[in-house]
């Protein structure tokens, strides 16, 4: 590896310049010493020598500065080159590390995939073995079940035959019972019709009796009212008639009397009919309790 340019500290550079100036002045002074034969010194030449030596020093200083700037520039360029090399190396290392990581991840992924495929394969094989075992067990169970069902079917067939026999016997007995019930029903219906006819006849006879009794009952009421009616003096009642609503309770006691309608008569006739009804209290008792009338309308026609 080559060494870089040599750099001098500022103090060393000043020391070198001072030594050079002193050395130059020493030389100039030595050369300017007066000879024994020369009495007068030329000041113009001395000043010129000093000016020339100062320019040389400035040139030397400029040269030194240029060399220093050159060394510094080369140093910066070398540093930049090393930095670029370091960055490039770092970049290459990072890329290499990235490739290694990608390779590692790919290998891990591949290993995982292979493991997954292997596990899936093992799982499928285990499932296939399990299904085969289940199928075998199912086949044995189906065979056993089929045998049980065959035995059960034979037993059911036997039971069915016995049941059919029982049903036929029950059907025969049911038909006999039904026929007997049908005959009993016919007989019962005939008897019911006879009883109904007898009841209808008795009811009709009773109704005729009640109608007769009720006519007699109403006639008795009308007779009593008419016997108690007094014709109003000076009133023509030959064509007069009234419809009277009468309400009574058991015992013939009158609760209410209301004239519904009167025709061919005067108010005196109306009032005389109402008074005759009230005078009839209590009304005659009915010949039978079934013909009692708690409320009825009596047609009063004195004639």
Image (cartoon, grey):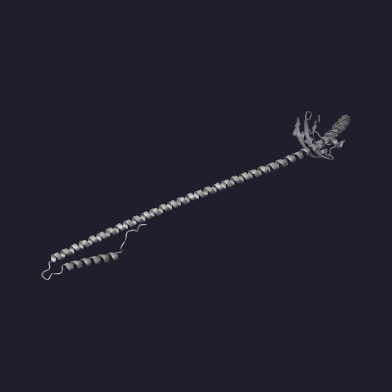
Q: Is residue 70 above or below residue 242?
A: below
* Residue 148 drawn at (x, y percent): 79, 39
Observer able to see residue 223: no
In front of the other: 114 or 264:
114
Within the image, what quadrant is residue 139 found in? Answer: top right
In front of the other: 168 or 245:
168
Observer able to see residue 129: yes
Which residue is located at x 45 percent, y 52 percent?
94
Which residue is located at x 18 percent, y 62 percent?
52
Direction bottom: furthest residue: 36
Q: In this view, does 133 lie above or below 10?
A: above
Direction front: furthest residue: 36
* Residue 119 drawn at (x, y percent): 61, 46
Total residue callouts: 0
Q: In this rendering, would 74 be left or right of 137?
A: left
Quick one: quadrant of the N terminus? bottom left
* Residue 67 drawn at (x, y percent): 28, 58
Q: Is residue 7 above or below residue 295?
A: below
In front of the other: 4 or 176:
4
Within the image, what quadrant is residue 250 found in? Answer: top right
Quick one: quadrant of the C terminus? top right
In front of the other: 92 or 28:
28
* Residue 211 drawn at (x, y percent): 85, 31
Q: In this rendering, would 190 be left or right of 42?
A: right
Within the image, what quadrant is residue 72 found in? Answer: bottom left
Q: In this rendering, would 302 be left or right of 49?
A: right
Which residue is located at x 74 percent, y 40 percent?
140
Which residue is located at x 55 percent, y 46 percent?
110
């Amino acid at each position: 590896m080559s060494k870089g340019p040599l750099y001098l500290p500022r103090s060393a550079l000043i020391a070198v310049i001072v030594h050079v100036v002193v050395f130059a002045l020493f030389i100039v002074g030595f050369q300017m010493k007066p000879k024994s034969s020369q009495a007068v010194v030329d000041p113009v030449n001395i000043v010129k020598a000093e000016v020339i030596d100062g320019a040389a020093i400035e040139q030397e200083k400029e040269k030194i500065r240029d060399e220093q700037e050159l060394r510094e520039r080369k140093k910066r360029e070398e540093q930049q080159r090393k930095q670029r090399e370091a960055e490039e190396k770092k970049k290459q290392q990072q890329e290499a590390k990235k490739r290694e990581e990608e390779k590692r991840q790919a290998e891990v992924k591949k290993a995982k995939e292979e493991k997954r495929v292997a596990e899936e394969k093992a799982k499928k094989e285990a499932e296939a073995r399990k299904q085969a075992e289940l199928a075998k067990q199912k086949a044995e169970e189906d065979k056993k079940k089929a045998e049980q069902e065959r035995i059960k079917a034979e037993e059911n067939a036997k039971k069915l035959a016995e049941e059919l026999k029982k049903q036929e016997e029950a059907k025969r007995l049911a038909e006999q019972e039904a026929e007997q019930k049908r005959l009993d029903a016919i007989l019962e219906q005939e008897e019911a019709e006879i009883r109904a006819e007898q009841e209808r006849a008795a009811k009709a006879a009773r109704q005729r009796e009640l109608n007769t009794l009720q006519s007699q009952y109403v006639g008795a009421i009308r007779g009593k009212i008419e016997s108690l009616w007094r014709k109003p003096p000076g009133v023509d009642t030959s064509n007069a008639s009234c419809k009277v609503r009468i309400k009574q309770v058991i015992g013939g006691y009158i609760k209410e009397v209301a004239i519904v309608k009167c025709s061919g008569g005067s108010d005196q006739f109306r009032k005389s009919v109402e008074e005759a009804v009230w005078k009839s209290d209590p009304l005659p008792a009915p010949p039978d309790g079934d013909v009692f009338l708690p409320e009825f309308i009596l047609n009063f026609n004195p004639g």
